[in-house]
C-alpha cells in the first residue's frame, strides 16, 4: 500500500500553530533585554553576569532533548502530542515573569537576598521557556510537508519578531507614558515590572490560541505518512533511546552544529554584555555603575535596540523564502551571518547612541535566518517519527556555545578588557563571521523548490 502524502497547510493554519511562539518570544525578549539590567540592579558585578546567564543554556541542554523525546511518545485525543508541553511551559514561564523583577520584595518575606531569588526565578523561567519552545520547532516538522519547511519557520520568525519587538520595547514605551524608570537601590523600576506582567498575560493568551486552533496528526497519521513504516515507533518510551539517537544524528546536523556554535556564541555575547557595553562605551559610565538613572536609560536603549533588530528580522523573514529559492539555503544563511557579524562589530565604531539602530539592521538579518534556515535545512534529513528528539538534540549546538561563553566570557571581559565589555561584543561579531564561512561549506542542502507535481497528484486531504 502506498503511503499517504502529508497535505499542504494554508498560511492561516501555519500562523495558528505558531501563534504561541509570539508569546514565548515576548517573554524571551523581556528576559534578553532586561535580565542583565535586573541582576545589576540587585548588585551583580558585570564580570559575573555571564555566570548567571549560564542557567539558560544548561537548562536547555537538559530539558529540550527530554521534552522532544517525551513529545514523540505522547498522544491523547484531547491534548495531542506537543500541546501539553506548550501549556505547562507557558504557565511556569508566566509565574517566573511575575516574580523575577519582584525578587527584592520576595526576599523580604523569605530568607535570602534579592540576587539569590532573581537567579532562582531566572532559572525557573529558562527551564520553562525551554519546555514551551522546543515543541514548536517539532510541530513544524510534524505538521508541514518538507517543501513547506522554509515557509513554516519563516512564519515562526515573523511571529517571534513581533513578540520580541513588543517585549524589548515595552519598558521604554511605559517610561514615555509616565511609568517610573527609576527605583530605590536594590529594586527594579516599575516600567520593567509592569512589562513583565504584560508579558505573562500575552504568553498565556497566545499559547491557548494555538492549543484551541490547531489539531495535531495522530500516531496512525504519522505511520501512514512515514517512509519508515517498517520501523514503527516503540510503544514504550525509553530515555536511553536519546543517547542512541544522539550517536546516529545525520551528517548534515553535525555540520550545521558548527554553524550554530559560532552563531549562538555571538548572540549570547550580545544579550549578556550589550547593556554594560553601551553604558560604558557610549554613555561614559564606569563598569560598576548598575543603579544610576543614566544606567537605566542605557538599559532602556538596549531594549529599544533589541526591538529594532527583531523588527528588522520580521522584514527579512519575508525575504528568506524567495532568496533561498534563488541562491540556495546555505548561501542565504551565510549572507545573513556576514551581515550580523558586521552589525556587531560596527557597534564599536558608531559613537552616537542614536545611530546604533544601523548596527541592528545586520543583526536583524542574521537573527531572521538563524531562526529559520538551519531548521529548514535540517527537517529534510530528519525521520518524521523522531522529529521532537532530534530538534531537542540540535539544541545542544545552541546551548553548548552559550555554556562555554558563560564560563569564560566574564573572565575575558575582566582580565582582557578591564570590565569594558564592548571589545568582547566585537569578538562576538568575529565568531559570527566564522559561522558564515562554515555555512558556505555545507553540502547537499540545495534550494527550496515547490512541491513536485506527482505529490500534488497523490495528495490526500485529511
Image (cartoon, rainbow, N blue to C red):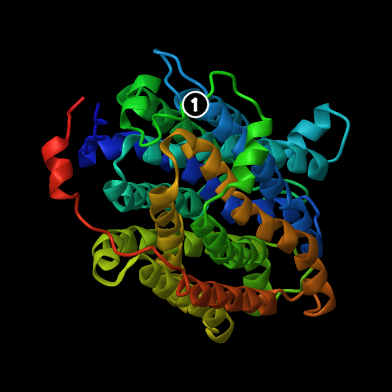
Q: Is residue 185 above or below residue 112?
A: below
Q: Nearer the viewer, residue 159 or 403?
A: 403
Residue drawn where x is 33% and y is 24% of the image: 221
Q: Which secondary structure lies at badge 1?
A: loop
Residue drawn where x is 33% and y is 59% of the image: 317
Please indicate whether residue 383 sits to the left or right of residue 287 in the image.
left
How many tags in the picture?
1
Residue of label 1: 233
Q: Nearer the viewer, residue 31 or 217?
A: 217
Q: Nearer the viewer, residue 80 or 196?
A: 80
The spot of residue 19 in percent (x, y) is: 36, 37
Please indicate whether residue 231 sits to the left or right of residue 407 in the image.
left
Q: Nearer the viewer, residue 181 or 96?
A: 96
* Quarter of the N terminus within the rendering: top left
The spot of residue 125 in percent (x, y) is: 64, 38
Please indicate whether residue 260 sits to the left or right of residue 19 in the image.
right
Badge 1: residue crowd in 10 Å (few <14, some 14–19, many ≥20): some
* Quarter of the C terminus within the rendering: top left
Q: Is residue 437 above or below residue 320?
A: below
Q: Is residue 198 above or below residue 56?
A: above
The image quadrant that residue 60 belongs to is: top right
The spot of residue 331 in percent (x, y) is: 37, 72
Viewer can see residue 291: no
The image quadrant that residue 408 belongs to is: bottom right
Viewer can see residue 439: yes
The spot of residue 340 in percent (x, y) is: 48, 72
Residue drawn where x is 45% and y is 75% of the image: 440
Amino acid at each position: 500500500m502506498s503511503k499517504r502524502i502529508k497535505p499542504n497547510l494554508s498560511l492561516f493554519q501555519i500562523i495558528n500553530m505558531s501563534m504561541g511562539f509570539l508569546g514565548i518570544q515576548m517573554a524571551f525578549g523581556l528576559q534578553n533585554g532586561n535580565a542583565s539590567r535586573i541582576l545589576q540592579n540587585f548588585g551583580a558585578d558585570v564580570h559575573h553576569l555571564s555566570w548567571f546567564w549560564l542557567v539558560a543554556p544548561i537548562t536547555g541542554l537538559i530539558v529540550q532533548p527530554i521534552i522532544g523525546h517525551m513529545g514523540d511518545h505522547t498522544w491523547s485525543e484531547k491534548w495531542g502530542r506537543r500541546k501539553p508541553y506548550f501549556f505547562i511551559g507557558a504557565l511556569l514561564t508566566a509565574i517566573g515573569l511575575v516574580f523575577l523583577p519582584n525578587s527584592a520584595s520576595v526576599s523580604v518575606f523569605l530568607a535570602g537576598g534579592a540576587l539569590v531569588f532573581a537567579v532562582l526565578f531566572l532559572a525557573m523561567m529558562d527551564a520553562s521557556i525551554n519546555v514551551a519552545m522546543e515543541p514548536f520547532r517539532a510541530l513544524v516538522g510534524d505538521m508541514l510537508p518538507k517543501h513547506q519547511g522554509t515557509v513554516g519557520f519563516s512564519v515562526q520568525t515573523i511571529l517571534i519578531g513581533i513578540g520580541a519587538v513588543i517585549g524589548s520595547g515595552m519598558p521604554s514605551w511605559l517610561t514615555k507614558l509616565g511609568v517610573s524608570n527609576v527605583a530605590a537601590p536594590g529594586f527594579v523600576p516599575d516600567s520593567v515590572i509592569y512589562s513583565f506582567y504584560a508579558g505573562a498575560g500575552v504568553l498565556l493568551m497566545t499559547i491557548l490560541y494555538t492549543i484551541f486552533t490547531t489539531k495535531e496528526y495522530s500516531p496512525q497519521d504519522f505511520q501512514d505518512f512515514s517512509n519508515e513504516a517498517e520501523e514503527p515507533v516503540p510503544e514504550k518510551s525509553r530515555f536511553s533511546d536519546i543517547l542512541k539517537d544522539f550517536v546516529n544524528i545525520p551528517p548534515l546536523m553535525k555540520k550545521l552544529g558548527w554553524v550554530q556554535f559560532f552563531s549562538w556564541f555571538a548572540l549570547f555575547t550580545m544579550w549578556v554584555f550589550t547593556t554594560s557595553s553601551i553604558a560604558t562605551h557610549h554613555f561614559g559610565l564606569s563598569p560598576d555603575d548598575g543603579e544610576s538613572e543614566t544606567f537605566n536609560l542605557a538599559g532602556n536603549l538596549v531594549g529599544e535596540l533589541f526591538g529594532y533588530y527583531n523588527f528588522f528580522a520580521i522584514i527579512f523573514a519575508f525575504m528568506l523564502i524567495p532568496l533561498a529559492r534563488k541562491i540556495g539555503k546555505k548561501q542565504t544563511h551565510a549572507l545573513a551571518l556576514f551581515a550580523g557579524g558586521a552589525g556587531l562589530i560596527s557597534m564599536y565604531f558608531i559613537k552616537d547612541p542614536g545611530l546604533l539602530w544601523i548596527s541592528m539592521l545586520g543583526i536583524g538579518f542574521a537573527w531572521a535566518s538563524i531562526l529559520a534556515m538551519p531548521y529548514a535545512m535540517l527537517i529534510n534529513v530528519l525521520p518524521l517519527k523522531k522529529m521532537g528528539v532530534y530538534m531537542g538534540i540540535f539544541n545542544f549546538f545552541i546551548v553548548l556555545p552559550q555554556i562555554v561563553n558563560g564560563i569564560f566570557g566574564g573572565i575575558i571581559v575582566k582580565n582582557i578588557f578591564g570590565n569594558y565589555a564592548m571589545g568582547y561584543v566585537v569578538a562576538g561579531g568575529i565568531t559570527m563571521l566564522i559561522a558564515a564561512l562554515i555555512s558556505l561549506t555545507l553540502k547537499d542542502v540545495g534550494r527550496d523548490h515547490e512541491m513536485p507535481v506527482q505529490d500534488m497528484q497523490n495528495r490526500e486531504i485529511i
